[in-house]
Image: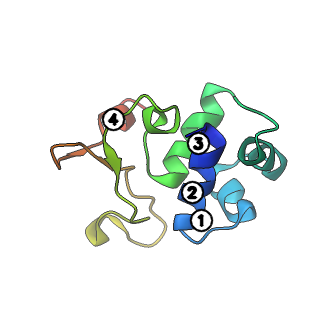
Amino acid sequence: MTLGAKLKALREARGWSQHELSRRARVRQALLSELESGKKEDTTGSVLRRLARALYVSVDYLLSTYNGTVDPSPCPGKEQCFAGATPSPVTTSPQGGYGCEEYSKI
């Protein structure tokens, strides 16, 4: 699956428009559109990090270097979701655990 296809699938799974994802990730909507349509196939690391954070996945997952599965819930734990706060991005490993190691460094 391409980067654009993953972005679109994750965005639609959350019920977000391109405008909503671009607002949450602080990226241009035109860039998001180009990535999703395949007109552009890559972008900078900072854009990838912002998109990954907004979608609650790892950059590894977006780049197809992650072998686990993604927790489709836009808010992995209700205790982590409170007014004005963004929960930590969460992915699940093949063994069923949770990992946010990449984001502890950001």
Q: Nearer the viewer, residue 38 or 56?
A: 38
* Residues at marks 2 and 3, CA–CA distance in whole angstroms: 17 Å
Q: Position of residue 12 (x, y in %)?
A: 59, 65
Image depth: mark 1 or mark 3 in front: 1
Q: Position of residue 98 (x, y in %)?
A: 22, 47
Name the residue that disc number 4 marks: 67
Query: For numbered disc 3, what is the local secondary structure?
Result: helix
Quick check: marks 1 and 2 in contact, CB under 8 Å? Answer: yes
Residue with the most extreme front position = 1
Residue at point 38%, 33% (across, down): 66
* Residues at marks 1 and 2, CA–CA distance in whole angstroms: 5 Å
Quick check: marks 2 and 3 in contact, CB under 8 Å? Answer: no
Q: Nearer the viewer, residue 83 or 51?
A: 51
Name the residue that disc number 1 marks: 12
The disc label shown at residue 9, or none: 2
Q: Earlier in the sequence, mark 1 or mark 3?
A: 1
Q: Is 11 left, or right, of 98 in this rendering?
A: right
Residue at point 55%, 36% (across, down): 49
Callout 1 amino acid? Glu
Name the residue that disc number 3 marks: 50
Callout 2 amino acid? Ala
* Residues at marks 4 and 1, CA–CA distance in whole angstroms: 21 Å
Query: For numbered disc 4, what is the local secondary structure?
Result: loop
Residue at point 67%, 26% (across, down): 44
Callout 4 amino acid? Asn
